[in-house]
Amino acid sequence: MMFTHADGNPILNLDDDQSWRLLEGTKHGRLVVTVAGEPDIFPVNYAVGGRKLYLRTAPGNKLAELTINSKVLFEADGIMADEAWSVVLRGTARILDNSADIAAAESLGLKSWVPTLKDFYVEIEPVSLSGRHFQFGEQPERDF
């Protein structure tokens, strides 16, 4: 995906469509949950469907924590030789519990990274989305 930076600014704020295209083209990110004021972060693989994120998980801290506090933060990024991007999604997570929702999530082809049973599907409904694209380069000289 090509990005045009205006006025030579190495940082470009992305619009929602650009951010979603990046999320759709990437399959890994980090999920942040918070319980009792303590944040926790988990690397996850995910799928996008209908401008929502989906992931699979097994019983454990991640599932328990997002059940206690459904407000989550998700971040995905890409780093290349001369550019990078980052997309942050704030949202509300819910465990899918009806067969139609689970079937829709399964149709996205989301597979587990590791050979473990991940019987729970989680949907993240976005509340806000922000993305930035970065062009790498040398730090400029300071004007005095």
Image (cartoon, helix red, strand yellow):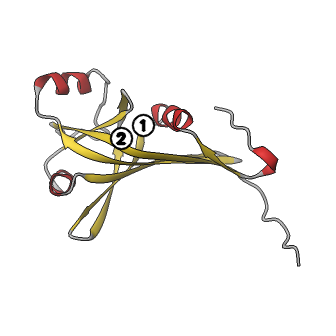
Question: In the orientation shown, which residue stands out farthest toward the front?
Answer: 127
Please report contact status of discs 2 and 1: CB closer than 8 Å, yes or no.
yes
Task: Return the x and y of residue 45 as percentages of the image width and height.
Answer: 35, 41
Question: In the orientation shown, which residue stands out farthest toward the left?
Answer: 98
Question: In the orientation shown, which residue stands out farthest toward the right?
Answer: 144
The residue under the point 30% across, 66% down is 39
The residue under the point 25% across, 27% down is 105
Where 34 falls versus 29 (above or below)?
below
Report the number of numbered marks.
Answer: 2
Asked if residue 57 lies left or right of residue 124, the reply is left
Where 79 falls versus 106 (above or below)?
below
Task: Return the x and y of residue 134 as percentages of the image width and height.
Answer: 66, 50
Q: Which of the marked residues, 2 or 1, is nearer the chain's N terminus? A: 1
Report the amino acid beneath label 1. Answer: Lys
Quadrant for residue 120, please give it.
top left
* Quadrant of image for the N terminus: top right
Asked if residue 144 lies left or right of residue 27, the reply is right
* Quadrant of image for the C terminus: bottom right
Task: Return the x and y of residue 130 as percentages of the image width and height.
Answer: 50, 47
Q: Which numbered circle lies on residue 54? A: none
Q: Secondary structure at mark 2?
A: strand
Task: Name the residue beneath numbered marker 1.
Answer: 27
The residue under the point 73% across, 52% down is 10
Task: Return the x and y of residue 142 as percentages of the image width and height.
Answer: 84, 73
Q: Secondary structure at mark 1?
A: loop
Query: Mark 2 packing: few (<14 Cα in 10 Å), some, or many (20+)?
Result: many
Quadrant for residue 5, please give it.
top right
Task: Name the residue beneath numbered marker 2.
Answer: 45
The residue under the point 58% across, 46% down is 85
Q: Nearer the viewer, residue 94 or 114?
A: 94
